[in-house]
Image (cartoon, helix red, strand yellow):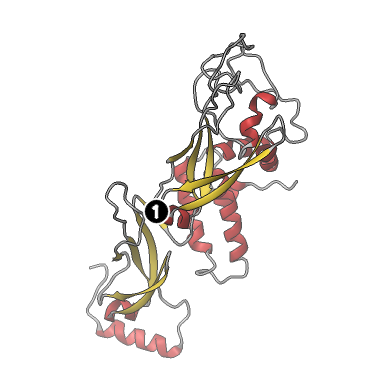
Amino acid sequence: MEYKDYYATLGVKKDASQDDIQKAYRKLARKFHPDVNKAPEAEVKFKEIGEAYEVLKDEDKRQKYDQYGSAWKRAQQTGAPPPGWEGINFDFGGMGGQGFGGGEFSSFFDMLFGGARRAGGAGAGFPGFGGMGGMGGNPAGFRGTGGDSEATLSISLEEAVRGGKREITLSDPNTGQRRTLSVKIPEGVRAGQRIRLAGQGQPGMGGGAAGDLYLKIEIEPDPRFRVEGSDLHTSVAVSPWEAALGGDAEVQTLDGPVRVKIPAGSSSGRKIRLRGRGLSQAGNGTKGDLLAEIRIMVPEQLSERERELFQQLAEASSFRARA
């Protein structure tokens, strides 16, 4: 399998922080977005950047990538080490330090979404041992509550803003049986929040109740918008004469393009606020706003006439940008 150096793709070091990785992605995404960069290779580069960021922004995926390289996805999907890694043992704790290969004790969540983390304390990592620490066996007549589990649910920005339903499929690692659950995504959900599915976690012991499954929300990056609290941020490109004289421009929203007024005398960085176009705010039923930041664009190549007019403007104007 061809090795892809995701760190090199984003231009960061292997020990880069999550904040540095996010900043590098945003910078490159703006540079190579097909709507901005018309070079033939821009779209391919944009996809490579997105692929690298999708892995490195997630702590679990990044850990598997650092460990297995290009085979990380197989390890995540199957719950078992990829070919060539079978002899490596993993210590899951709670059993006197005894090592186990990625086998039956980790199979439930390795089968579910791959690389998910288990919630709970000692013993929570072993099916049917909820509340029993590391004790083995099943005393006669004992009924134990199953442990809680956690996985990541990746949703689009549109789903986060509007809410909706998503179906997920779980597979029982012991029987192979699959079951489909319908998950309700709340309107205005934020990254990092969790959705609780009661009774869908680790099975209980001796007929005891199952634990709960918690789905931690992750919002997929959208090259058009940036989320800050309840607000969405985007940009709108305007020409120098539109910025100076004012005019109309089209701004992209999640509900489609909207025409806005560009105030005369606008400089780069000025923001136009579209109220109620953001995420729902918890508790008060209102929505955040969409803020479109003005970016003044100039032609890379000027015609003779354009150059002449700009030269006349430079000679006639008393305005000094760096005064």
> Does 197 appear above or below 98?
below
Which sits in the foreground, 7 or 189? Answer: 189
- Residue shown at 54% from the left, 22% from the top: 124
The quadrant holding residue 110 is top right
| Residue 201 picture location, percent across and down | 55, 31
Question: SS class of the residue under badge 1?
Answer: strand
| Residue 5 picture location, percent across and down | 64, 46
Can residue 239 be seen in this snapshot? yes
Image quadrant in which the C terminus is located: bottom left
Is 184 placed left or right of 293 in the picture? right
| Residue 144 picture location, percent across and down | 55, 18
Q: Residue furthest top?
A: 140
The quadrant holding residue 102 is top right
| Residue 76 picture location, percent across and down | 65, 38
The quadrant holding residue 43 is bottom right
- Residue shown at 73% from the left, 36% from the top: 82
Q: Which residue is mark 1?
A: 227
> Does 157 appear above or below 270?
above
Can residue 58 be seen in this snapshot? no
- Residue shown at 71% from the left, 29% from the top: 174
Which sits in the foreground, 317 or 257? Answer: 257
